[in-house]
């Protein structure tokens, strides 16, 4: 998959396009991508996913914007697995916000050479969301594209959506979130140096700075850490670390039964399996140490790690 830069536009080959935030990259999103890939194969065109960074609602009203399911690096990796030819990330700023719906269609057809546009039934675009699928249909002949609408995907008679998955993650219900995602819930991040307190109390951690707007209940989880293709069982804390007066939101992962793993500045994947408990402030490091030992026992049971 090639990530297209602004300077590479316009493209010199026709494409089959889909547009959206694709937050969570759930089974409904993958259904759209299946159609994109099939149409690209039928027509001999290239497939392209057009997404936004940041989420459009975060630009309009950061306080009321939805929390984020999938960070941009995880999104890139998931798209790479789908064998999409191109990814174009639109920087959602004032200029893009003011782009009219018709001008956006011109951008798709002239710059990205979209000949087929495949989108969800609720697609909206352009200044103040003036455009939708019916608006786009009016310009098919004039601009030389065809639009195809993908109806919502139902699982157990429930409509799969990013909104639904966000609610599960806010409750710490990883199992249901993963079920509707159609994959394990995970976050990709760059390892940063922590304050070494975990190491001092016998439980060294790998630390990843978490997005402040991540959709996830604060607390301790059983899960895995994937490092350069190898997966290790882990107990994971997501939160502010109140016992040590943590100021920033952090994901800390202690790899079970492993001590020395130096990974600073490397990218890793944190995979969440099951919520264990809420984040809590302890009155001493000794009490924190005892609780972590209990968390590890529970994580081993959940992950069926041999004791």
Image (tube, rainbow, N blue to C red):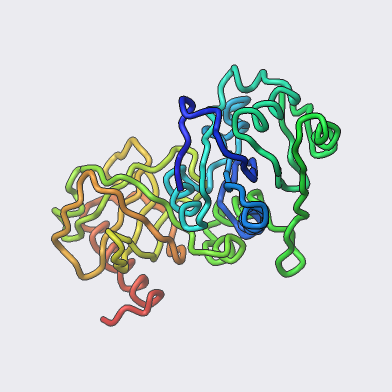
Q: Nearer the viewer, residue 216 or 144?
A: 144
Q: Residue at horizontal 32%, vertical 61%?
A: 226
The image shows residue 188, relative to residue 181, as above or below, that is above
Q: Residue 187: horizontal and vertical position, in percent?
A: 42, 52
Res 190 → quadrant: top left
Q: Residue 196: horizontal and vertical position, in percent?
A: 17, 47
Q: Residue 265: horizontal and vertical position, in percent?
A: 23, 43
The image shows residue 134, relative to residue 1, as above or below, that is above
Can you say which quadrant of the picture contains the C terminus? bottom left
In the picture, measured across the screen, residue 56 lies left or right of residue 85, that is: right
Q: Residue at horizontal 77%, vertical 42%?
A: 146
In the picture, measured across the screen, residue 118 lies left or right of residue 222, that is: right
Residue 194 visible in the current orientation = no
Res 231 → quadrant: bottom left
In the picture, measured across the screen, residue 175 lies left or right of residue 188, that is: right
The image shows residue 219, relative to residue 125, as above or below, that is below
Residue 123 visible in the current orientation = yes
Q: Nearer the viewer, residue 234 or 229?
A: 229
Res 288 → quadrant: bottom left
The image shows residue 154, relative to residue 20, as above or below, that is below
Q: Residue 285: horizontal and vertical position, in percent?
A: 22, 53
Q: Residue at horizontal 57%, vertical 44%?
A: 48
Q: Residue at horizontal 71%, vertical 46%?
A: 119
In the picture, measured across the screen, residue 214 lies left or right of residue 209, that is: right
Q: How many marks?
A: 0
Q: Nearer the viewer, residue 302 or 33?
A: 33
């Amino acid at each position: 998959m090639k990530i297209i830069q602004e300077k590479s536009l316009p493209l010199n080959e026709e494409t089959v396009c889909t547009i959206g935030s694709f937050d969570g990259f759930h089974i409904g999103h993958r259904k759209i991508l299946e159609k994109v890939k099939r149409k690209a194969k039928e027509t001999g065109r290239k497939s392209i996913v057009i997404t936004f960074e940041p989420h459009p609602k975060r630009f309009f009203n950061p306080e009321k914007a939805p929390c984020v399911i999938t960070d941009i690096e995880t999104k890139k990796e998931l798209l790479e697995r789908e064998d999409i030819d191109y990814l174009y990330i639109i920087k959602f700023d004032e200029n893009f916000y003011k782009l009219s719906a018709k001008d956006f269609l011109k951008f798709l057809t002239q710059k990205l050479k979209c000949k087929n546009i495949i989108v969800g039934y609720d697609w909206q675009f352009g200044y103040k969301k003036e455009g939708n699928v019916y608006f786009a249909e009016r310009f098919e002949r004039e601009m030389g594209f065809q639009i195809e609408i993908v109806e919502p995907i139902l699982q157990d008679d429930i409509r799969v959506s990013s909104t639904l998955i966000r609610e599960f993650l806010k409750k710490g219900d990883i199992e249901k979130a993963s079920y509707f995602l159609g994959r394990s819930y995970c976050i990709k991040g760059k390892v940063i140096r922590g304050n070494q307190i975990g190491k001092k109390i016998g439980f060294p951690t790998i630390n990843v700075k978490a997005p402040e707007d991540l959709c996830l209940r604060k607390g301790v989880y059983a899960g895995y850490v994937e490092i350069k293709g190898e997966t290790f069982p882990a107990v994971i804390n997501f939160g502010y670390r109140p016992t040590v007066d943590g100021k920033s939101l952090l994901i800390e992962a202690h790899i079970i039964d492993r001590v020395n793993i130096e990974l600073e500045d490397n990218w890793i994947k944190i995979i969440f399996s099951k919520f264990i408990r809420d984040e809590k402030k302890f009155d001493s490091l000794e009490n924190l140490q005892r609780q972590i030992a209990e968390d590890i026992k529970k994580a081993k049971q959940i992950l069926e790690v041999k004791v």
